[in-house]
Each structure stands twice: as structure tokens, then as C-alpha cells.
């Protein structure tokens, strides 16, 4: 029999203390049930490892179609966003069933393992170039000087646009993440919507340009992808939506993985020293970083029917936040879950990249970028340490768990 769902009436996921460290609240809520209701957001929150795993595999009753949910476009701006906000038109992350299967199959033709692996030398060259710029100063902000520009320039190369466009990618990503925060003033939503319209114009023009002038890049590959069985192709709107998703998610999560991993390694500097002495520890450290500080805190599903999730009944029509970070620190799945333990012996696999049909298509590229970024830091700045005078700063966001600033010295 399903149990009553606890209501966390005083819980505010956007409160400064929760942005800084959500784990104590997640632990407290999870002790009550694997799924709780958060009135502040009018959302159910799946917290336990079992609840999140059930949500990820139950694509029949829990739909991805309206992800990310950023509300209605203000009436006066609908002519510039006729299909809704960027990322809302159904493509890959926010569609279900056969449509998702077809789009994913076609998108995989553009993200082959050989294409991803061929980027390693480019990633290394870019990482070294960014470090060359900061070495004379003896200090850097890992986010703005290294992780963010590295991930955005790599993405620019993949999309076949000039490196200078990378700054715009960061701005576009900030816009969409701001919109997914849900709670904001009317003026703030209008400002973000104007920026989102600029983003949509940019992505649309980019795709149409590639249709007229094909290049050796991912956009062209998406436009040319064809299902050998059904002869299906991606519509222009689908390609625009996929490119928009790449610009936002393709760099944000990778930059966050790099930043969170360095933070975890330098928080107890013996961890950094261990990697300096044994590079075979790097891959396990990255996987443990993904578990301990999953870059994505929440994505959303919608209940198509009444559905039981880890013993809690969720009503039809309810919005469910999938708590990746909470699931990855569930003590029922991982021993001492808030400890950073590379190579841990737990049988469970972390859920940072999702699971099943919606497993992150960009996971191989994210792992490659993070590994090369860490290798370059270990090679070039082995004396790296946290700044004693300038503390890190968390970014206020509902969907991602990342640092806005991480000052370091060497």
C-alpha cells in the first residue's frame, strides 16, 4: 500500500543555505520518504536512489515532454518565440516514446565515439592555451578562467562556429538556467525572455546557415542524419532545439564537473597529491565527483497517471523533480555517501548522467573533457590550492549544483 506523501511546508530549495549546501535538507526529507511534496514549488521531489531509478525507467507513466518547464512566453513576445522558449520544442531531452527513439537514433549519428575521441588533441590544446594566460599571475578563478571557457570553446568547435562565439553560449546558458529557477519577478521573467528570444534567433540562423552551406560539424551531421530503416530525418525545428540543448547543457554540466572535481580534490589536498603521484586514480575520482556532487540537481517529469514511486502515490498531472544529487547520496545505496571515496566498493552506479532511454548522450564527451582538463592542471600547475583570502561562491540555481566562482592560487 502506498504511504502518505510528506509535505515540506518550510522547505525552500532556493534559500541561500540550500543553494550553499542542500545535502542536510535532502537527508532529512529522505528520512521521511523517498518522495516528498514541496509547496513552495508545487512539485513532488524524488529523493531516494530507488525513487529516482523508478522515475528514470518509468517512461510510460512519467513524461519528459515539458522539460524544462519555464512557463508561458509573455504575450507581447510570442511573435519572437512562436514555439515557446528554447529547449521547449520536443527534441531529445523533452520527448517520449517512438519520437524520442527516432530523434535519439538520428542524433547519435552526429555524436559518434570516433568524432568525440577525435576532439582530445583539440581539448588539450585549448586547455594549455587557457593556462598559458593565467600562469604569470599565479592565481585564477577556475570557473571564469578555465572550466567555462574550455567547455564553451570546445562546444563552439563541435558546432563549427568561431571560438569568439563561446562567450555568447555562456550568456545563453545563464538565460535558460535563470528561467528554470521558477520563482522570479515579472520584470525578471521579461528580461530573461528577451534574452531567450535572442538565443532562439541565433540558433535558428545557425541551423539555416548550415543547411545552405554544409560543413564538417555536428549541425551539418544532424541535418544530414537519416534513419536507414524508416528514411526519417530531423525537422529543422528539431535540429534547432537540439542545438539549443547542446549550447545550454553541453557546456554547463561539463564545466560544472571540472569545477566540482577540482573543489573536491583541493578541499582535502591529500586527494590532489594522490593524483599527482598516480594518474590511474583520475578516472575513479571523476566518477566519484559525479556521484558526490552531481552537476544536475533536478530535472522534471510529469505524471501521466496516478503513479506509485518508492511507496509514495503521486497524482496524475503532478510535476516531479528528479533529484539526481539526492539519489547519489542516499545512504541506502552508498556507504558513507557524503564522503568522497574514489573507487568505492558500492555495487550501485551513480545516476548523474541518468539511466535508461534518457541516459545523457554527451556523457562520453563530458568525461573526455573533464579528464583532459584535470590532466593539464596536474601537469601545468601541480602546486594548485584553494585561495585562503577569497572563498568559493555557489551559483543560485534550482537545476544545477555548481560554483559561480572558485578562486585558486599556485
Image (cartoon, rainbow, N blue to C red):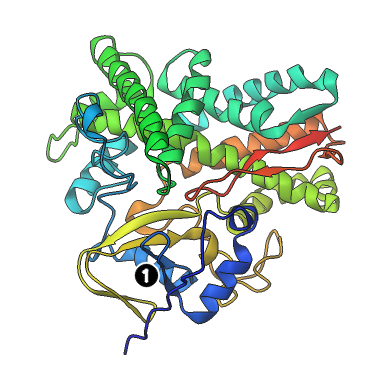
The reply, left or right, for residue 140 in relation to residue 92 is: right
> Of 230 and 318, which appears nearest the observer?
318
The residue shown at (54%, 69%) is 348
* Disc 1: CA contacts within 10 A as few (<14), some (14-19) or many (>=20): some
Q: Is residue 228 left or right of residue 111?
A: left
Q: Give the camera-side residue of 175 and 352.
A: 175
User: How many circles with numbers are drawn on the protein?
Assistant: 1
**Residue 262: x, y in percent?**
72, 43
Say which element carries label 1: helix
| Quadrant where the N terminus is found in the figure | bottom left
Q: Is residue 363 above or below residue 77?
A: below
Residue 110 visible? The answer is no
For the point 87% across and 41% down, the residue is 388
The C terminus lies in which quarter of the figure?
Answer: top right
| Apparent side of residue 229 relative to residue 276 in the rendered image (left or right) | left
What residue is disc 1 on? 54
Q: Quadrant of residue 25?
A: bottom right
Q: Quadrant of residue 381?
A: top right
Residue 2, compared with residue 349, is above or below; it is below
How far across and how far down the image is residue 237, in percent? Answer: 21, 30
The structure residue drawn at horizontal position 65% and vertical position 33%, both measured from the top left corner, is 143
Residue 97 visible in the picture: yes
On the image, the x and y values in percent for residue 17 come to 63, 57
User: What is the residue that sits farthest to the left in this orientation?
Assistant: 230
Q: Is residue 343 above or below residue 260?
A: below
Relative image position of residue 180 (x, y in whole percent): 41, 45
Q: Residue furthest bottom?
A: 1
128 versus 5 height, above or below: above
Nearer to me, 77 or 218: 77
Amino acid at each position: 500500500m502506498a504511504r502518505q506523501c510528506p509535505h515540506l511546508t518550510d522547505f525552500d530549495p532556493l534559500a541561500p543555505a540550500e543553494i550553499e549546501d542542500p545535502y542536510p535538507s535532502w537527508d532529512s526529507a529522505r528520512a521521511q520518504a523517498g518522495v516528498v511534496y514541496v509547496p513552495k514549488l508545487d512539485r513532488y521531489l524524488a529523493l531516494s536512489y530507488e525513487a529516482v531509478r523508478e522515475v528514470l525507467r518509468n517512461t510510460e507513466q512519467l513524461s519528459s515532454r515539458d522539460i524544462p518547464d519555464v512557463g508561458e512566453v509573455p504575450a507581447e513576445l510570442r511573435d519572437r518565440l512562436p514555439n515557446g522558449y528554447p529547449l521547449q520544442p520536443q527534441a531529445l531531452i523533452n520527448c517520449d516514446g517512438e519520437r524520442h527513439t527516432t530523434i535519439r537514433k538520428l542524433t547519435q549519428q552526429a555524436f559518434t565515439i570516433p568524432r568525440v575521441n577525435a576532439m582530445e588533441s583539440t581539448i588539450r590544446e585549448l586547455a594549455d592555451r587557457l593556462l598559458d594566460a593565467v600562469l604569470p599571475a599565479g592565481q585564477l578563478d577556475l570557473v571564469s578562467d578555465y572550466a567555462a571557457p574550455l567547455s564553451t570553446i570546445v562546444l563552439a568547435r563541435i558546432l563549427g562556429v568561431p571560438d569568439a562565439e563561446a562567450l555568447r553560449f555562456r550568456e545563453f546558458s545563464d538565460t535558460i538556467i535563470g528561467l528554470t529557477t521558477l520563482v522570479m519577478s515579472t520584470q525578471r521573467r521579461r528580461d530573461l525572455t528577451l534574452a531567450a528570444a535572442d538565443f532562439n534567433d541565433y540558433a535558428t540562423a545557425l541551423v539555416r546557415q548550415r543547411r545552405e552551406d554544409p560543413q564538417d560539424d555536428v549541425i551539418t551531421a544532424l541535418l544530414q542524419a537519416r534513419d536507414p530503416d524508416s528514411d526519417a530525418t530531423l525537422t529543422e525545428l528539431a535540429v534547432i532545439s537540439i542545438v539549443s540543448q547542446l549550447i545550454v547543457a553541453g557546456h554547463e554540466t561539463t564545466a560544472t564537473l571540472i569545477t566540482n572535481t577540482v573543489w573536491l580534490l583541493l578541499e582535502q589536498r591529500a586527494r590532489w597529491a594522490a593524483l599527482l603521484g598516480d594518474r590511474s586514480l583520475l578516472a575513479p575520482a571523476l566518477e566519484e565527483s559525479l556521484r558526490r556532487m552531481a552537476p544536475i540537481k533536478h530535472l522534471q517529469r510529469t505524471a501521466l497517471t496516478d503513479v506509485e514511486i518508492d511507496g509514495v502515490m503521486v497524482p496524475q498531472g503532478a510535476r516531479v523533480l528528479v533529484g539526481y544529487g539526492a539519489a547519489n547520496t542516499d545512504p541506502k545505496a552508498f556507504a558513507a555517501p557524503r564522503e568522497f571515496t574514489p573507487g568505492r566498493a558500492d555495487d550501485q552506479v551513480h545516476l548523474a548522467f541518468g539511466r535508461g532511454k534518457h541516459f545523457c548522450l554527451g556523457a562520453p564527451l563530458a568525461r573526455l573533457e573533464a579528464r583532459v582538463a584535470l590532466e593539464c592542471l596536474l601537469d601545468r600547475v601541480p602546486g594548485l590550492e584553494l585561495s585562503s583570502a577569497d572563498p568559493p561562491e555557489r551559483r543560485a540555481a534550482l537545476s544545477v549544483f555548481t560554483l559561480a566562482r572558485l578562486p585558486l592560487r599556485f
